[in-house]
Image (cartoon, grey):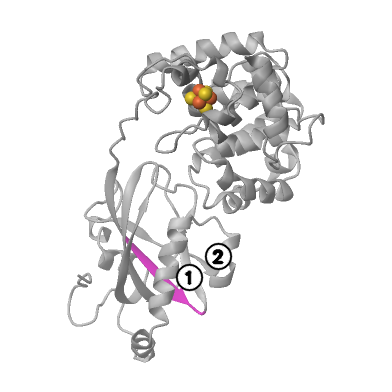
């Protein structure tokens, strides 16, 4: 079985920027970066980010020395931003503790921030040829189908079974790196998850596959129960001044922590230390010295942690508040701003360019926090 898979992988492997040509040695630093980026993220999304990242930080020392802002700007839009901070910390640890060489042993790899047994196993096996397992969701799906195991995909016992089976198989492989990467590739390109059908006719493991033999390949594994996400309503203020928008650092522990975003507050909430009056769009405008608050629309974004409904407002700057950064609109791409907040800013800018809004902006400015037509701002229905 291992020989059939590695022979298939040599023929069918995709050309990806972190994979050198067949036979060439792997770059451990490239593997470290790509494995962090691939956590919870599809290959097709990672390709462009990886190339830009390596161009900016060609070695682990470049990455270790980079300012966090620069790194976050290059990660912006890829999501799961804690990975970026962990990768940065790992690069520093590689330089400080391992002389700039990514370690090859599981025990050392798992001391790096954000490197769990999966990432450590992938690097040890794929880069250094160690007989170590690396079982992600793709690998689990292939193995439960090949063995015909109708296991609950969310159960810890299933992850344990998968890890044990992957360990046995990688130890039996003549080329552990090709076996591990081939198994991942098979799960990603042939043994597809529902609602797609696995492409068994093209599969190098078809002759060994119990699920296929029993006609169960469409029923194993069972669908995962979806986790319920919390819903957040966020009031977001896009404040403009001379072709720039106001951005502020997102507080630690919040969604998009460590990035820059337009001033935002969760509706009806105040974090410890906040003035509770700021937990409204009017309070937010007062806090950031903005005038002419106007609701311009809403948009919804789903993150790994929450469904966020942004209620978007435009405003103009009355004064330059402390802590605000002004970023030129055409330079937003160079800053660490999430794709969700870029969409929020785009919505606000579009509204600002409407003839009605231009007419309003040409009127004399109002006092900070005041709103048209009375004491409060009513959201557009
Ligand atoms: S034969 Fe089909 S179900 Fe079995 S491993 Fe191959 S693609 Fe998956």
Q: CA distance from mark 2 to mark 1?
A: 9 Å
- Measured along the vertical axis of the image, is residue 185 above or below residue 273? above
| In the rendered image, the vertical position of residue 149 relative to residue 59, given as above or below | above
Q: Which percent across, then down, holds residue 156? A: 38, 17
Q: Earlier in the sequence, mark 2 or mark 1?
A: 1
Q: Of 361 and 202, which appears nearest the observer?
A: 202
Across and down, in percent, residue 327 comes to 54, 68
Question: The C terminus is located in which quarter?
Answer: bottom left
Label 1 belongs to which residue?
245
Instruction: Say which mark, if any, is on residue 175.
Output: none
Quadrant of residue 235 in the image? bottom left
Identify the residue shown where x is 52% and y is 33%. 199
Residue 1 as seen in the image, left or right of residue 307: right
Mark 1: give few (<14), some (14-19) or many (20+) Cα within 10 Å.
Answer: many
Q: Are marks 2 and 1 in contact (CB under 8 Å)?
A: yes
Q: Is mark 1 within 8 Å of ligand 1?
A: no
Residue 107 lies in quadrant: top right
Q: Can the viewer see residue 193 in this picture?
A: yes
Q: Is residue 167 magenta?
A: no
| Element marked by disc 1 | strand
Q: Nearer the viewer, residue 323 or 228?
A: 228
Q: Nearer the viewer, mark 2 or mark 1?
A: 2
Q: Residues within 10 Å of mark 2 (few under 14, many from 20)?
A: some
**Image quadrant in which the N terminus is located:** top right
Q: Which residue in the protein does label 2 denote?
A: 332
The magenta-colored residue range is 235-242
Report the front residue among 321 and 96.
96
């Amino acid at each position: 079985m291992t020989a059939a898979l590695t022979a298939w992988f040599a023929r069918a492997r995709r050309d990806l920027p972190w994979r050198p040509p067949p036979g060439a040695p792997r770059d451990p630093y490239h593997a470290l970066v790509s494995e962090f980026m691939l956590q919870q993220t599809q290959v097709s999304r990672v390709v462009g980010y990886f190339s830009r990242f390596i161009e900016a930080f060609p070695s682990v020392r470049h990455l270790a020395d980079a300012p966090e802002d620069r790194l976050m700007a290059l990660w912006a839009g890829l999501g799961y931003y804690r990975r970026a901070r962990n990768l940065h910390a790992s690069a520093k640890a590689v330089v400080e503790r391992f002389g700039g060489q990514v370690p090859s042993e599981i025990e050392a790899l798992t001391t790096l921030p954000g490197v769990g047994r999966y990432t450590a196993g992938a690097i040890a096996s794929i880069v250094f040829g160690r007989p170590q397992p690396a079982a992600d969701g793709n690998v689990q799906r292939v193995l439960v189908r090949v063995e015909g195991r109708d296991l609950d995909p969310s159960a810890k016992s299933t992850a344990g079974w998968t890890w044990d089976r992957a360990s046995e198989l990688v130890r039996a492989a003549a080329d552990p790196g090709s076996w591990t990467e081939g198994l991942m590739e098979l799960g990603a390109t042939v043994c597809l998850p529902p609602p797609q059908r696995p492409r068994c006719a093209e599969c190098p493991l078809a002759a060994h596959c119990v699920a296929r033999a029993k006609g169960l390949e469409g029923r194993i594994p069972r669908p995962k129960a979806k986790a319920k996400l919390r819903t957040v309503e966020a009031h977001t203020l896009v404040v403009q001044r001379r072709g720039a928008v106001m951005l502020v650092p997102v507080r630690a522990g919040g969604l998009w922590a460590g990035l820059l975003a337009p001033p935002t507050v969760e509706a009806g909430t105040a974090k410890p230390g906040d003035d509770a009056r700021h937990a409204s769009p009017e309070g937010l405008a007062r806090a950031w010295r903005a005038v002419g608050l106007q609701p311009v629309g809403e948009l919804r974004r789903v993150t790994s942690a929450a469904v966020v409904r942004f209620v978007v407002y435009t405003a103009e700057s009355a004064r330059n508040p402390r802590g605000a950064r002004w970023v030129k609109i055409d330079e937003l791409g160079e800053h660490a701003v999430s794709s969700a907040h870029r969409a929020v800013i785009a919505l606000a800018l579009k509204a600002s360019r409407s003839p009605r809004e231009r007419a309003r902006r040409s009127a004399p400015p109002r006092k900070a926090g005041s709103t048209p037509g009375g004491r409060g701002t009513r959201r557009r229905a």
